[in-house]
Image (cartoon, rainbow, N blue to C red):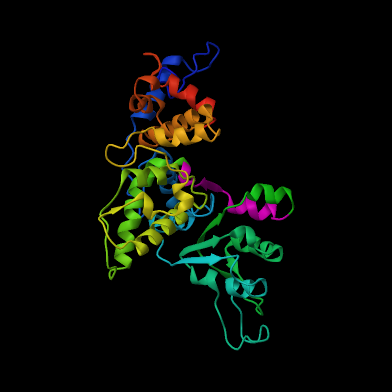
Amino acid sequence: MLAGAYDVVSTDASATTPLADTVQRRLAELACVSEPIEAPPGFVTRSAASQQVLADLDRVARTSMAVLLTGETGTGKDLAAHHLHTRSGRSGQFVPINCAAVPNELIEGELFGYVKGAFSGAVGEYEGLIHAATHGTVFLDEVDDTPKTLQVKLLRVLEDHVVSRLGESAWRTVDFRVIAATNRDLGELVRKGEFGDDLYQRLAIVRIELPPLRERAEDLPELAAHLIARFYREEAAAPHRITSITPPALAALLCYPWPGNVRELRNVLFSALVHKRSGDDLLLSDLPEHVVRGAPSGPLEGDRPLVDRAAIARLIDEGRMNLRAVRDELERTALELALAKSGGSPARAARLLGEVGRGSSRDPGGTVRAMLRRHRL
């Protein structure tokens, strides 16, 4: 692996298939050229992680398989679900259902529909959201919040694609594709008895996990530019417009861990743009304090030095100097920024870090990997 290998073919002499045939078949597989995948609007795929997600979505889109989208809050599960529906070729509607937003006593009627007089207040007939998705897609968002009583009733619907309205004994066949999403570990909920195993097995035929923003930092510059452009499209009357992000501000965005992922990035940028009154660039000072707190200490603007001698002098005078901590912070920040710019490649990051970052000729990223282990990155 250190020498650059990314695949392996067994040379076991006891194998039933000759090695030459195995190698030829593997080479034929590698030679297959996949058609370029067009990313949906707002789906940035510069990083390897996001490219893999887009490829997985595209493979499963044209099937009828149920898909479970997992990932932290704000990673874009709703965008991925929309992309699956768009690429599926289905002629029906995309019907999103937020399982956490509908009251438990109403959710069955909302999903399956009801006939007049089925319950108090049912003054007319209602077909239900699943029926509205005929020849389309049902998106069960936050499916982990589905009440246990409804989970049992969903089993028949998902297994046989039949729906019976409340107050009606007849079953009607409905052609729909189901996509579910959750930011929790459904497998763990099943083990705790908080989610039905049968329903989980039906929802998770294909499982796709969306990576958090901190694991696809290479996407952040383009993603930030896209969000800024989106802000000005939606806010055409904005009194002032910026054209770029300064390097210190971008460095702060790259260093921040983004627990709220893309949704949090959107909120931070939109808030900064609302308050921006002058200048063509988004500055470090335009960002909120909790984001700036994780920014590298330098270099900032122009020819300002990387090491702030006055700050170090103050620490020494006050008896608070910790040289090891300062050195580690500088090294860790440089590593994070170089890896973000290199797409996670230690060898390319080593070239960006200069002489101290280079490894041996056989393993140019060896030193960077050692530094990563030391800092537990």
Foreground of the two, 329 or 343:
329
Is 118 drawn above or below residue 61 in the view shown? below
Residue for point 27% across, 64% down: 240
Is 163 drawn above or below residue 213 in the view shown? below
Residue for point 35% across, 44% down: 248
56 lies left or right of 351: right
Q: Is residue 33 visible?
A: yes
Residue 216: x and y, percent? 43, 42
Is 108 drawn above or below residue 275 in the view shown? below
Residue 289: x and y, percent? 46, 52
**Quarter of the view holding residue 99:** bottom right
Is residue 205 rendered magenta in the image? yes
Name the residue at the bottom extreme: 123
Residue for point 38% across, 46% down: 220
286 lies left or right of 322: left
Residue for point 33% across, 67% down: 234
Q: Which residues are magenta?
A: 194-214
Residue 354: x and y, percent? 34, 23
Foreground of the two, 142 or 282:
282
Name the residue at the right extreme: 193
Residue 97: x and y, percent? 54, 66
